[in-house]
Amino acid sequence: MLTFGCAAITEQLGIHAVFGAFVAGVLVAESPRVREATLDALDSVITGVFAPIFFVYTGLRVTSLALPPVSISVLIIGGAIVGKVIGAGLGAKFGGMRLAPALAVGIGMSSRGSMELVVARIGLDLRVLSQTIYATIVLVPIVTSFTTPLLLRLAAGAVKPEPDEASRLDREAEDEKAVIKRTGTKILVGLSGGPRSYQAMRFAAPVARLPGATMVVVSVVPEDDASRRTSRLQRRAVLTKEESQHAFETFAAEERLPDCHPQLIVPPSPVESIREELRRGYDLVFLGAGRRRMVANRILTAVLEQGRADAVVLSGESFPRTFNRILVPTAGGFAARGAAELAVLYAKTVGAQIDVLHIVETLAVENTLQENVRAIGARVVTGLATLGEQHGVRVESHVKVSRSAGRAVLAAAQENQADLIVLGAIPRLLGRRMFLGNTVEFVLHHAACAVALFIPAARRAGTA
């Protein structure tokens, strides 16, 4: 409907409908609120249904007998290819590329011809183009589709990536492996008025600054002051609408977030409101929770039951303004990788230092295998240290042997004077209780500093 609406507007303005449809496509493709899964679904329908219909319709209007003589056809096709190579190649050259890469760009762009088919079809309908010219134009993208791969292989074979390009390719490869999306991330933060939830909101800010990221902050507020005085929510320090709005405006101004939106939820069913909001599709949900009640937290349970968004839960008794020394224990798993990425994104913003720790449990590994396990652990922490270096974050790597991983983590946190421990956790349901693993639960309940848990969505944890 958006496509047809934009097409109708441009048609009424005296511009062809195709330009309005093109604008609609750009708006949808570039909108940070449109999920990649939605774009993939649209792309499948377009390439599987509408594109074949268009190309068949375009081809049916071609009269092969209307083609000019072979010599003229070759001249026209050759001129079209050379024109595209020179035009795109000059643009690449003026953009700072060397001659060989610029030539490769020009050759690669020579196969682009879908829009010229649209323009040719319009010209034929308006009788601006003859059948001869139309048939020749349609022939150009057909020929370039076959010639471009051969020419591009010859041109690109001698091209070596420049340092900046090699760095960009490394970053793209790293982003493809990333657990946390680097573009268009949709973030939901649940506030209950306590210090943990507001610290969780600040912890989410670096992710909200990623390109195209969107943050929605949901705050639970009472219906009015009278209900606040008589409700049990009073003991939970739930803020009024005015207090929540003021706190949010202060936070948004301090953190300079590009796309952040507040949303107020009125009891008695905040969890149901959260469930409804989750159906809009989020990538990350940040929550603050007390250590004793975190496993039974209803909002966290709702997030995990929905199974589509990763959860980040921040727990602790007191919090500094910013975390300056972060400990990231890792075993190399999917959840631990997400925890490390989260720590790196935060540390990059505030200038914090990260200590990556891998622990070899002596009870789980025989003495003869300890050296091999230590070597594997060294590779794990080295990989995360490289990740930190790519983002300009100072990372120190540690591999330790201990009889208890949980006690080793707490000892490392005390030794390094860490004010935050970031752990990956994959919960399991034991009866009605959610179990996070022996190490995670031990650290969660005994750590002297704040603890943040990265819990991947069920659909991702199951395939990790």
Image (spheres, rainbow, N blue to C red):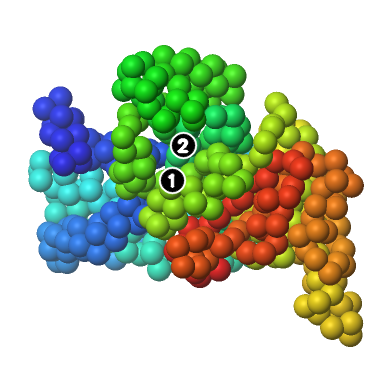
Q: What's the residue at 46%, 68% (across, down)? A: 431
Marks 2,1: beta carbons within 8 A: yes
Q: Label 2 vs label 1: CA separation?
A: 8 Å
Q: What's the residue at 78%, 78% (across, down)? A: 364
CA neighbours of label 1 inside 10 A, class few (<14), some (14 to 19), many (20+): many
Residue 212 x, y percent position in the rendering: 47, 37
Residue type at mark 2: give it: Gly
- Residue 230 visible in the shown view: yes
Q: What's the residue at 85%, 52% (across, down)? A: 412
- Mark 2 falls on what kind of element? strand
Q: Which mark is residue 190?
A: 2
Residue 459 or residue 226, whichever sits in front? 226
Q: Is residue 109 above or below residue 184?
A: below
Q: Quadrant of the N terminus?
A: top left
Q: What's the residue at 68%, 45% (across, down)? A: 451
Mark 2 or 1, which is nearer the eye?
Answer: 1
Residue 232 x, y percent position in the rendering: 41, 30
Mark before the other along the chain sequence, 2 or 1: 2
Residue 13 x, y percent position in the rendering: 15, 25
Q: Which mark is residue 299?
A: 1
The image quadrant that residue 143 belongs to is bottom left
- Residue 81 visible in the shown view: no
Q: Is 48 left or right of 261, judged from the image as shown?
A: left
The image quadrant that residue 4 belongs to is top left
Residue located farthest toward the front when viewing the structure as drawn = 230
CA neighbours of label 2 inside 10 A, class few (<14), some (14 to 19), many (20+): many
Residue 388 or residue 367, whichever sits in front? 367
Q: Which mark is residue 324?
A: none
Q: Is 109 left or right of 449, judged from the image as shown?
A: left
